Amino acid sequence: MDFNDTKEQAQFRKKCRDWLEANASLKAEKSSKSDFNNNDYLQTAKDWQKKKFDAGWAMLHWPKEYGGIAASPIERIIWNSEEAKFDVPRGIYDIGLGMCGPVMMQYATEAQKERYLPVMAEGKEIWCQLFSEPSAGSDVAGLRTKAEQQGDKWIINGQKVWTSGAHYSDYGILVVRHDPNLPKHKGMTFFFVDMKSPGIDIKPIKQITGGSSFNEVYFNDVEIPDSQRLGAIGDGWKVAITTLMNERLAVGDANGADVNEAFKWAKGQDDMGDKLIENMAVRESIADWYCEANGLKNTKLRTMSALSKGDTPGPEASITKIVSANKLQAIGNFGMDSMDMAGMLQTEDSNVHDFQSAWLGAPGLRIAGGTDEILRNIIAERVLGLPEDQRVDKGVPYKDIPSGK
Amino acid sequence: MNLDFSDDQKYLKEEARKFFEKENALGSARTTLENKLHTDENLWKKIVDLGWTGITIPESYDGLGLGHLELCVLAEEMGRTLAPIPFSSSVYLFTEAINKFASEDIKQDILPKLVSGEVIGTLAVTEELNAPSSENITTEVKNDKVSGVKIAVPDAKVATHSIIVTKSAKGVDLRLIDHSSNGISITHTNSIDESRGHFSLAIDNVSSKLIGEEGNGWECYERLIDQAAVLFSFEQLGGAQASMEMALSYAKERYAFGRQIGSFQAIKHKLADMYISITLAKSNSYYAAWALSTESSDLSVASATARVSSTKAFQFCSKENIQTHGGNGFTWEYDCHLFYRRSKLLSVNLGSLSNWKNRLVTGLEKSNVS
């Protein structure tokens, strides 16, 4: 056991570090807040991606012909861990490059790959993902948005929801129902769509945090050429599942107030004459969060160790989101409670703000990219090999499945 | 980056697993418990023959001279089968105390005998129905003679020696006593987990040898349990994994309402939570193993983190294993209760969960990691 890079890894890390130092500044106590609804910030993000692309850092693991350098997984991890130390825009390309890119690589034609992938890697075109619907969340395969074939094009009608970045995206990947007479998993087809197509209407969703990172996307007689179909007619679910697997890997650690913030806070906070850290109940909670935070950190190190040796990592990373999102919620709750009634007040204090945004934001993280419950099903079925749940909608034509309101 | 065991260590783990299966250590845990045999002496002899009691003892004292990482993989496999042997008492605590703190004379005398099996040791701390502290120890040493009563001492009957935590003129001392000395009486006490016998030691003016320095016994004890907590956490991890595997195979075999109970979400989510607790415990134990093997300054916090995570995992998995088994889980016949009992033994031996949580935060305060 050791925590050192191999000689090659150390050289690669130095290369990353040298380039980052020449092109960006290290994170300070107060780093820029990401706000992709602000056009200037969006432009900064695009400029940074372009800079990385020109220097070969944009899509490390992609093949060379699409703008990557075919880097190994461990090199990708090294790059990410170094980039994370710098005050640069992150996150805006996660869906495009993490989910849409791989699905295009697998299912698009050669000409389409050449047209779309390098531009995506360069950051010039942003992509989004259109899967969830008002009546299809955890049960994505229950989606209703309709596709009708007319000659060599398809006409799309319906509504998608929870689409991150739809309002600044150029393209999106879309799964729709082409035949409601087939059982639900068989009647779906997958496309990519130009988000500027006539008939697409995008409305922001206001979240409980007050912010708007997601949208409702309406489709009214939107035309998509059949050449933009990914996979065969009826293979929509198969293609979607590939993409969702990538999402569940991408949605990992919940960022925000963590055990170190809680610990520091408890050392400074008054608790009826004592410091809050002297309170046994608080000490126990901090110990629990420390075990969770370090359990995740060390789990990541185990995954990296496997990658570093060229092995396939085990399924251990599947616990990340459940553990971190719940911890975030608990820490936010603790921070606000510790101020008694004042915990309700929105103030200039950045610690208070961090606890409150953790508390308000964590419910979303426990849902996005697979709810806690769906993730537990996945662990139980895929990792532990328990049998699938028995479903009442299996083999039933989609149109006959009870759907409530 | 390599937070993993080496191929040799994994091989040792594999061999240990095969060994405990072949010896039916779990079956022996039941026999030992039902017949109050306190320990499986045959199994212990075989372990001595394999050299495992001398894993970390230097070759100059006839040991194998391997590191703590090898001990960690063995601990995990022992925990998995609830092996009814005094390994934790004699190896993680007694041997480590001698190896780390004893004088050269004592080491020359005792260490080779631990390897050969002639000496088996244990550690005697508890006196009352309280957690021990440097303040409440009453067993006393005067002119090298120890007097007092220790209770809940694991494995004392099979042990030939004990290290006694005593009060001395200068504070707290660690004292080595030989069980064949005059003035010692060892009495069995019924306990929750009879697969590992617990005893009281009445010690009346018994000759002893100092381990460590006069007055620094409590620091030595703290250091010892910091180390031992890592090894205990591997035993607990093994027990947690075995409990989850039992629950898992029952959930696949047992039918109710016309289907496998493992197809119900209530059972699935319970098992997913077991997997989560085990993954956290495993990753934290691996890190603590690294800290132990390199004598990292982080050992105190790392061992508490592993200890808390593994205690939680084994307690959770063993109790929910019973629940998954329904009525069968509550019978004497099924093995579920053996794991439940051992999870309690391992979680109070070295101190309770809340105690270790407090230690963890105290460690953070000291190291000022923030």
Image: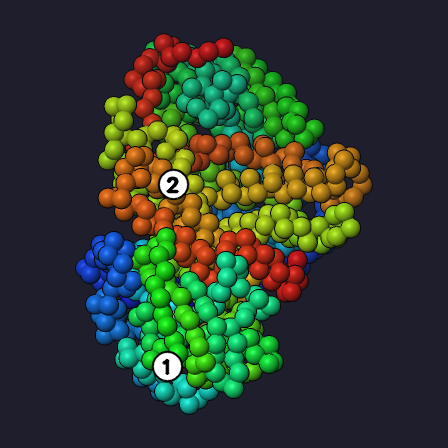
Residue at 46% from the left image edge and 69% from the top image edge: B149
In the picture as drawn, the residue positioned furthest to the bottom comes out as B105
Q: Determine whether A279 is above or below A153 in the image.
A: below
Q: Quadrant of residue B334?
A: top left
Observer-nearest of B52 and B338: B338
Chain identity of mark 1: B
Please, is residue A99 above or below residue A13 in the view? above
Horizontal side of residue B351 vs B48, given as left or right: right
Q: Is residue A12 visible?
A: no
Q: Amino acid at mark 1?
A: Asn
Chain to which mark 2 belongs: B
Query: Which residue does the numbered mark 2 point to in the structure image?
Result: B320
Crowding near the residue tagged with mark 1, few <14, some 14–19, many ≥20 C-alpha atoms within 10 Å? few
Residue denoted by label 1? B182
Label 2 sits on a secondary structure element that is helix
> Residue A297 placed where, x, y %?
52, 53
Q: Quadrant of residue B113?
A: bottom left
Q: Secondary structure at mark 1?
A: loop
Q: Is residue A353 left or right of residue A292?
A: right
How many other residues sit within 10 Å of disc 2, few (<14), some (14-19) or many (≥20)?
A: many
Q: Earlier in the sequence, mark 2 or mark 1?
A: 1
Circle nearer the viewer, 2 or 1: 1
Seen at 54% across and 43% down, the residue is A324
Residue B292 placed where, x, y %? Answer: 47, 69
In this view, B144 is above or below B304: below
